[in-house]
Image (spheres, grey):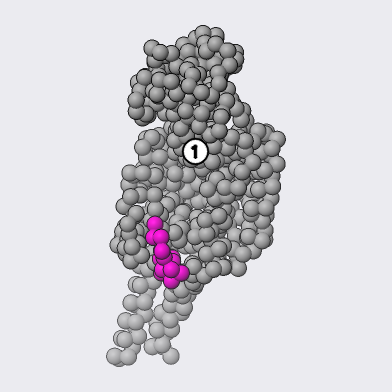
Amino acid sequence: MGLVFTKWACAFLLSCWLITYKVHSVEGLHRGSKVRGVNLGGWLVIEGWIKPSLFDGIANGDMLDGTEVQFKSVTLQKYVSADNGGGMNVTVDRDVASSWETFRLWRVSPSEFQFRTSKGQFLTCDGDGCTVSATANSPSTSETYEIERNGNSRIHMKTKNGAYLQATTDGQLTADYPGSPGWDDNAATFDMTILSNNLHGDYQLANGYGHDRAKDVLKRHRNTFITIEDFKFLYKHGINTVRIPVGWWIAFDPDPPSPFIEGSLDALDNAFLWAQEYDIKCIIDLHAAPGSQNGMEHSASRDGFIGWPDSPDNIQQSLNVIEFLVSRYARNPALLGIELLNEPSAGTVPLDTLVSYYKQGYQIVRKHSSTAYVIMCQRIGMADPMELYQANIGSHNTVLDLHYYNLFDAYFVNMSVGDNIQYIYNSREGQLKALNSSNSPLVFIGEWVNEWNVTSGSQKDYQDFGRAQLEVYNAASFGWCYWTIKNDRQHWDFEWNIRSNYLQLGKSPSKQRFNIFGLIGLAFTCFCLPFL
């Protein structure tokens, strides 16, 4: 009798465990797996820091779109200033330069530029003898100036009419310098300081080279940077998913709006073919939205301004791109999900605007696919990921994308090896547990990297850091995706990390997980034993 009771108790407890055991798995992946992925960053959306050599052939490459510059009169020793940051007069009367004295370049040709103020207006001057003001809301001929350079810093500025700008003795900027200035001490000569030249994205590349040359550069890059051999490598090392960043102009191939270059759609089609051959799934990620959702180069921003959230046309165009992508690939067996928008800025994209966009995007995806995952990226900056959990965006196969980097914040600057590793366990693990316990959506670490601010880390240090991240991120209910597959900076390069043994992936969590069917069999055996 005691033996029978024990067996019945065993069966009962195992059955209860099976009922309450929560196994996260992703539909479309084999054997109850979760995403073990790699981003194909820097391929169809250009990020110059990933492959700087793409920009090497651009004339005046230090003066790309979005470059921040300041001008100081040689004679007055005063800075050119847009009063109140724009919308008013331009003066040459400031001893110290700050935001009012800083202008962002819009490049027209290698030697012609438009100057945008910190508030968004452009410097304008209409006709010979005119006085420059900062009152134009959009640029055309009157806002275009030729820059003549003598070396890197000393310049002249000339209107389209051929008149040179000069700093007058009463602190005005006028287009009436007589004759052609030399490079000595004269009113038409300025010292130009390049404050930053940080934007190296699709806009800068295409507008920097011009269409024909940019087409050649990007065709060669798209054909060689990622190939079928990379998918073979990923498959060999247990990667089951790729996240593919795309730009909004992909929906207009083969004739995208200027200055963007055609060809990214053909490359995306190739990625789906290669993925099918190696049983890899694809997430299409709208990385660059019209107007820019974060002002960064990877959103194809022209000059760092963020125009996506304030423009209903930009938002609608983004939804049209989502519809284009999901209608094209919904029936493709390699499609796993659509990410509606990458890294919207918390500082400039209001939550209600983003939630409305995500809800509309969800409905568009569901119109074409009942199973494709709809992925929503957390706002970057000071934003709580729980804000999207509470928004009730969709009822089926929704995913929240978090990007985890021990970088880009002063908090991490002086951390030791041990501090970085403990941060993963003490902070990230707790957040993931809290998010995993919620009903919906699933949690995805859509970007992470085996890099930090530690300057003297050994190979073992990197292995330990990577192991800690994998141990914690493996618990994410949807999975994770490394940033990125290839990079000139070695520790960001997934393939280099694997080949050099700096990142040790280990076994898939699905292979380490308890065998549910085996437990069912054990429970069944326990149940049947009393009758044998």
Q: Main secondary structure of the magenta part?
A: helix
Q: Is residue 265 left or right of residue 191?
A: right
Residue reaching furthest to the front: 184
Q: Which residue is mark 1?
A: 197
Packing grade of label 1 (10 A; few <14, some 14-19, many >=20) is some
Q: Residue at x 42, y 28 (%)?
A: 102
The image position of residue 156, as x and y in percent, is 53, 23
The secondary element bearing badge 1 is classed as loop
Which of the pair 16/295 is nearer the observer? 295
Magenta span has 465? yes
Q: Locate the N terminus and report the quarter of the image it occupies.
A: bottom left
* Front residue of 73 and 443: 73
Residue 303 screen position, x and y as percent = 49, 33
Name which residue lies at 38% across and 35% down: 348
Tag 1: residue type? Asn
- Whether residue 259 is visible to the viewer of this picture, yes or no, is yes
Q: Residue at x 63, y 60 (%)?
A: 230
Above/below status of 526 relative to 129:
below
Q: Nearer the viewer, residue 250 or 114?
A: 114
- The answer to whether residue 336 is visible is no
| Image coords of residue 453 (percent x, y) | 39, 57
Range drawn in magenta: 453-467
